């Protein structure tokens, strides 16, 4: 099993529970979407999984190794297995597409070459190849600020892939895009996931797209898992139990 979440709990500073006793596992090569209403704990969960914040209780295992207990180099080595793409892209607008993709290399570089942007030829070639793979071969030197939202998310995907992750976390990756562009991005992501046998764990407010592109759905409600199963088992009754009421797709 690639990822195992065991009894994760997280409270905010005011002691409000964001996640309570959350447990599930994700196998290599799965595309899993976490769904649920706003405030259900979806983003908190992904921030715990990428190490941005820590959980208050419970454990996270990547390939049977405890992530939350790891320290120093060992934790950094485990974090290399994971990459994240975000709703707001998290790109440097004045930098070129190529430079933004290459930024994925910075955590593993020494301070001086990192500060000077001294990337190797191999790194530059791989970054350019990844931009071509996501459909931006002609935008290598283009400043990100000149791109459309969909193109920016393609740059973010290329940056994530440069880390060569086993697990790709996607936090509402198409929420800021129009429906047609959002579908194109998910088609791209699904194609890469299947070709590379990557694992994708995606937060999604769009139930219809989550159903279409996922192998499995995990439903969060008030910080607790209330459903975990294949898409075909997410009946209208199940969806109502996740969102608290029947919703239209």
Image (cartoon, rainbow, N blue to C red):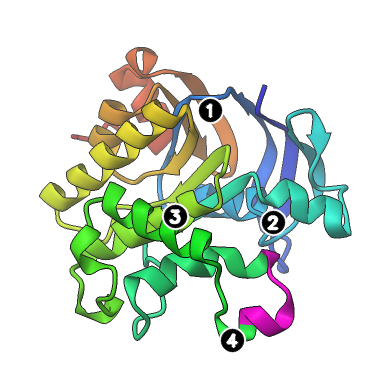
Left or right: 164 as drawn, with respect to 156: right
Name the N-terminal-most of marks 4 and 1: 4
Q: Is residue 158 above or below residue 25?
A: below
Q: Where does the magenta region start and end? A: 108-114
- Numbered disc 2: secondary structure: loop
Nearest the viewer among 131 and 12 is 131
Q: Of all residues shown, which one is farthest toward the front?
A: 121
Name the N-terminal-most of marks 2 and 4: 2
Alpha carbons under labels 2 and 4: distance apart:
27 Å
Nearest the viewer among 114 and 25 is 114
Left or right: 63 as drawn, with respect to 208: right
Asked whether residue 244 is in view, the answer is no
Q: Which mark is residue 126?
A: 3
Local packing at callout 2 (Cα closer than 10 Å; few below 14, some 14-19, many 20+) is: some
Name the N-terminal-most of marks 3 and 2: 2
Name the N-terminal-most of marks 3 and 4: 4
Q: Residue at x 21, y 49 (%)?
A: 182
- Numbered disc 4: secondary structure: helix
Q: Which mark is residue 226?
A: 1
Q: Residue at x 19, y 44 (%)?
A: 184
For disc 2, the marked residue is 51
- Residue 31, image x, y percentages: 43, 29
Local packing at callout 1 (Cα closer than 10 Å; few below 14, some 14-19, many 20+) is: some
Q: Of all residues shown, which one is farthest toward the top?
A: 233
Q: Which mark is residue 116?
A: 4
């Amino acid at each position: 099993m690639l990822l195992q979440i065991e009894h994760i709990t997280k409270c905010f500073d005011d002691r409000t529970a964001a996640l309570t006793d959350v447990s599930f596992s994700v196998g290599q090569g799965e595309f899993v979407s976490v769904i649920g209403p706003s405030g259900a704990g979806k983003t908190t969960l992904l921030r715990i999984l990428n190490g941005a914040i820590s959980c208050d209780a419970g454990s996270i295992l990547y390939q049977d190794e405890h992530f939350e207990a790891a320290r120093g180099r060992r934790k950094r080595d485990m974090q290399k297995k994971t990459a994240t793409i975000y709703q707001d892209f998290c790109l440097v607008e004045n930098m070129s597409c190529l430079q933004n993709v290459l930024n994925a290399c910075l955590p593993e570089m020494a301070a001086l070459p990192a500060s000077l942007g001294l990337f190797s030829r191999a790194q530059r070639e791989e970054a350019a190849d990844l931009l071509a793979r996501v459909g931006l071969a002609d935008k290598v030197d283009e400043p990100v600020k000149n791109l459309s939202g969909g193109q920016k998310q393609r740059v973010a995907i290329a940056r994530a892939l440069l880390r060569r992750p086993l697990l790709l976390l996607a936090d509402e990756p198409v929420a800021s895009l129009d429906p047609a562009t959002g579908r194109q991005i998910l088609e791209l992501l699904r194609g890469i996931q299947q070709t590379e046998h990557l694992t994708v764990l995606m937060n999604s407010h769009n139930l219809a797209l989550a159903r279409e592109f996922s192998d499995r759905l995990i439903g969060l409600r008030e910080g607790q898992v209330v459903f975990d199963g294949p898409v075909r088992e997410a009946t209208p009754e199940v969806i109502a139990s996740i969102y608290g009421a029947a919703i239209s797709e």
